[in-house]
Image: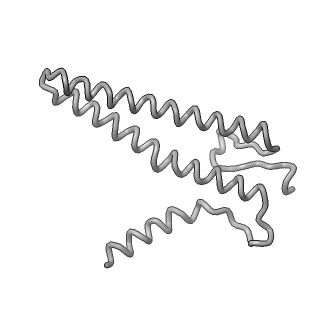
Amino acid sequence: MTDFLSFIGVKIALAQGLVPNCSPTECGEEQLLQLGVNVINFMIQFLAFPLVVVFFLWGGFLLLTSGGSPNRVEQGKKAITGAIIGLVIVLTSVVVINTLLGTFTSCEVKLSQIGKVNCPGITD
């Protein structure tokens, strides 16, 4: 039971930074956009990059332990190629999301300050 409670505690600790601080009466468009950016950043940092590393390492492991087996060499190459393609898709999605935010809203997500939304016309 204590393992389950510590697992829940870790999940709660990770989720603390996702939701922007605002009361129910003052939450607006900027906080909604900030929540979206926080969720996307969380998925990139804690899901996408670790998965890319795992698949890259798995592909390298398959290549190193193939023993000349063409099937395992092919599996290793596919794992590494899939990891690289996944990384390109994730990084491209960041650019697309930033472009869409800049085009359709007055908000801006600076790549130097990942995770911070700047909406000058919404709340000053």
Coloration of the structure image: one colour
Residue projecting furthest to the bottom: 1
Give the quadrant of the C terminus: bottom right
Choose top left, top right, bottom left or bottom right for residue 52. top left
The total of numbered circles placed on residues is 0
Choose top left, top right, bottom left or bottom right for residue 109. top right
**Residue 123 relative to residue 78: left or right:** right
Q: Is 2 placed above or below 101 here?
A: below
Place of residue 17 in the rendered image (x, y in percent of width and height, measured from the top left): 58, 61
User: In terms of depth relative to the viewer, which is nearer, 108 or 92?
Assistant: 92
Q: Is 6 placed above or below 65 here?
A: below
Kindly identify the residue that appears in the image at 32 percent across and 31 percent down: 79
**Residue 97 relative to residue 2: left or right:** right
Kindly identify the residue that appears in the image at 50 percent across and 66 percent down: 13
Place of residue 26 in the rendered image (x, y in percent of width and height, measured from the top left): 80, 68
User: In terms of depth relative to the viewer, which is nearer, 120 or 67?
Assistant: 67
Kindly identify the residue that appears in the image at 50 percent across and 68 percent down: 12
Kindly identify the residue that appears in the image at 43 percent across and 66 percent down: 10
Give the quadrant of the N terminus: bottom left
Place of residue 98 in the rendered image (x, y in percent of width and height, measured from the top left): 68, 38
Choose top left, top right, bottom left or bottom right for residue 101. top right
Residue projecting furthest to the front: 71
